[in-house]
Image (cartoon, rainbow, N blue to C red):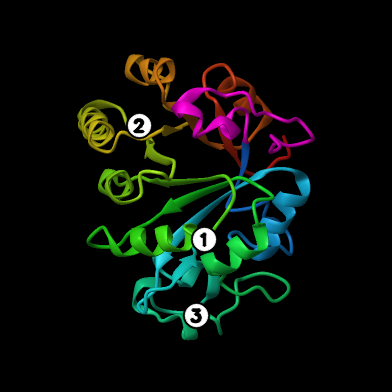
Amino acid sequence: MFFGGRGTVHCNMDKGAGMLDWLDGALFAHRGLHGPNKPENSIAAFGAAIDAGYGIELDLRLTADGRVAVFHDEALERMTGAAGIIEESDAAALQFLQLRGPGRHSIPFLNTVLAMVRGKAPLYLELKPSGRVGALEAAVAELLSRYNGPVLVASFQGLSVNWFAEHAPHLPRCLIIGPCPPGPIGEAQHRRERWHHKLSKPHAVSVHHECQPDAWVARLGLQDVSLITWTLKSPAALAAARTWADAYVFEGFMP
């Protein structure tokens, strides 16, 4: 059993042939339950999410020496004040950097997060591969091979999701789509997303909350595909999302 926040247990979902039974009604804290003294994607933010009964959404990037860092941006500057990018930095150098904000919070690595969570909260792992797909995915799959707990691997990149379909089909996988710009750009993006879905056959699709669930997305919800929506920033947005989505990524308030 896993919590959908505030003590409400959700564990009655049949989608994905039982692979995602734990997902129904799940609330994922976006980059952890961050705030004062708890920077985004920090151990403190993840611990706060666990204590509040929420799942955890976090971002993964590969370092120059093959470690899986938990960090959203490609560049280090916004969150650390340092120059450079994650993919060109080795783990030893990154461990000396501190995340911006009060207190001392270093950039975590996925192995450390998994050892801390230990199945106490569901994990939504967003992979952010740089360049060719394969290295980050393989490193994540290796770490998850020793992990016992509810987890979802997700990416905007259909080729990344497809890597898991081919090499680690036992892991629940999710294609992230959106935002949804209007006009020709949005139409081209939608065609690309549909192709990625056909290629990777995800168990879940994570849809930007401002993208109205069109006929294609609605059909996915009637099939063996779970619908997640992101990133909800108010109780009103969550209430609207509950009319069509199965699980929710939130930030900036306590559902």
In screen coordinates, is 137 left or right of 105? left
Which contiguous range is marked in magenta?
A: 1-26
* Mark 3 and mark 1: Cα distance apart in space: 24 Å
| Above or below for 6 versus 227 | below
Residue positioned 45% across, 28% down in the render:
16
Q: Nearer the viewer, mark 2 or mark 1?
A: 1
Percent from the top left, x then y, of residue 96?
56, 85
Is residue 94 part of the magenta span, yes or no?
Answer: no
Element under disc 2: loop
Q: Earlier in the sequence, mark 3 or mark 1?
A: 3
Query: The disc labelled 2 sits on which kind of residue?
Result: Cys
Q: Earlier in the sequence, mark 2 or mark 3?
A: 3
* Mark 2 and mark 1: Cα distance apart in space: 37 Å
Residue positioned 54% across, 67% down in the render:
111
Q: Which residue is mark 2?
A: 180
Q: Which residue is mark 1?
A: 146
In screen coordinates, is 168 left or right of 36? left
Q: Could you say which disc has been placed on residue 94 in the image? A: 3
